[in-house]
Image (cartoon, helix red, strand yellow):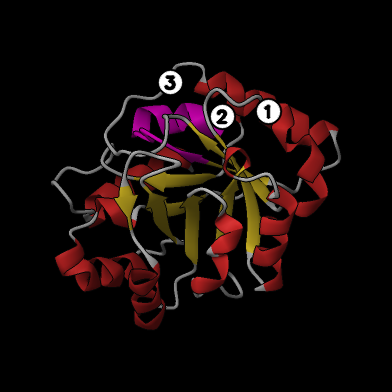
Amino acid sequence: MSYKLAPSMMCCDLLNVREQIKMFEQHRIDALHIDIMDGSFVPNIALGACFVEQLKKETRLPLDLHFMIDTPERYINTYPIGEGDYASIHFESTNHVQRALQMVKDKGAKTLIAINPATPIYAASEVLDDIDGVLLMSVNPGYAGQKMIPRSIEKIKAMRKFLDENGRSDAEIEVDGNVSIENAIKMRAAGANIFVLGTAIQTKKELFTREDIERFRLSVQ
């Protein structure tokens, strides 16, 4: 399965985001990862609907929206999700996971079920027919700059095996949290193919450089 790169917009200098987007477009970035946080499901607040609307006007790059909020079904329709985009719904965030996933599907976007580090992989079992992939958190969500939880690599392997054995070899695995080059090589070998890029690959604070992107790309080919 081909790899995809999704830089986290939360790790950019938001006052100079246009320059970052131009570089991403020139260097074949696959999607812009957007962390949506409410201060309740995770202990941080970030990147609301107005910001996402502006991004949508600025670029044709697909958006990769990561809903880290309670009851996401209440807010999905406030975001400009469309054809070619991705949206991840946390299994732990709502009692109505399928409803939230269907709302994303109705907008034409690809659906992923997101799973926290301590959530078992079989949480995905009841939504296998409703998703295009799984987002595995390799840190506890909420803040950039954390260290990867060591068991994450084994969890990626287990999820890849679980999906393959249940007729979903087509389902993608996205990884988010301390996706350094060293960790990404292991994640790729374990079965992940979408990588959320953040502070772990940045050589300059709040900035992705061409060199950062190309160095990472070479590591996961």
Q: Amino acid at mark 3?
A: Ile
| Furthest residue toward top | 150
Q: Quadrant of residue 160?
A: top right
**Mark 1 belongs to which amino acid?**
Ile
Residue under numbered circle 1:
121
Q: CA distance from mark 3 to mark 1?
A: 15 Å
**Residue name at image x 22 percent, y 68 percent:** 17
Q: Which mark is residue 189?
A: 2
**Is 62 within the magenta?**
no
Q: How many marks?
A: 3
Instruction: Determine whether, in the image, residue 114 is placed left or right of residue 15.
Output: right
Residue position marked by numbered label 3 in the rendering: 149
Q: Are marks 3 and 2 in contact (CB under 8 Å)?
A: no
For this view, does 1 lie left or right of residue 61? Answer: right
Residue 23: where, in percent of width, then height? 27, 67
Residue 167, located in which quarter of the rendered image? top right
Q: Amino acid at mark 2?
A: Ala
For the point 68% across and 28% down, the residue is 121
Element under disc 1:
helix
Q: Measured along the vertical axis of the image, is residue 167 above or below residue 211? A: above
**Magenta region:** 175-188
Image coordinates for residue 175, horizontal then vertical, percent: 50, 39
- Going from the N terminus, do you reach mark 1 or mark 2 first? 1
**Which of disc 1 and disc 3 is earlier in sequence?**
1
Q: Nearer the viewer, residue 206 or 28?
A: 206
Label 1 Cα crowd, 10 Å radius (few <14 / some 14-19 / many 20+): some
For the residues bearing labels 3 and 1, Cβ distance under 8 angstroms: no
Compare marks 3 and 2 and give the one earlier in the sequence. Answer: 3
Inter-mark Cα distance, 1 to 2: 18 Å
The residues bearing labels 3 and 2 have C-alpha atoms spaced at a distance of: 17 Å
Q: Position of residue 149 (x, y in %)?
A: 43, 20
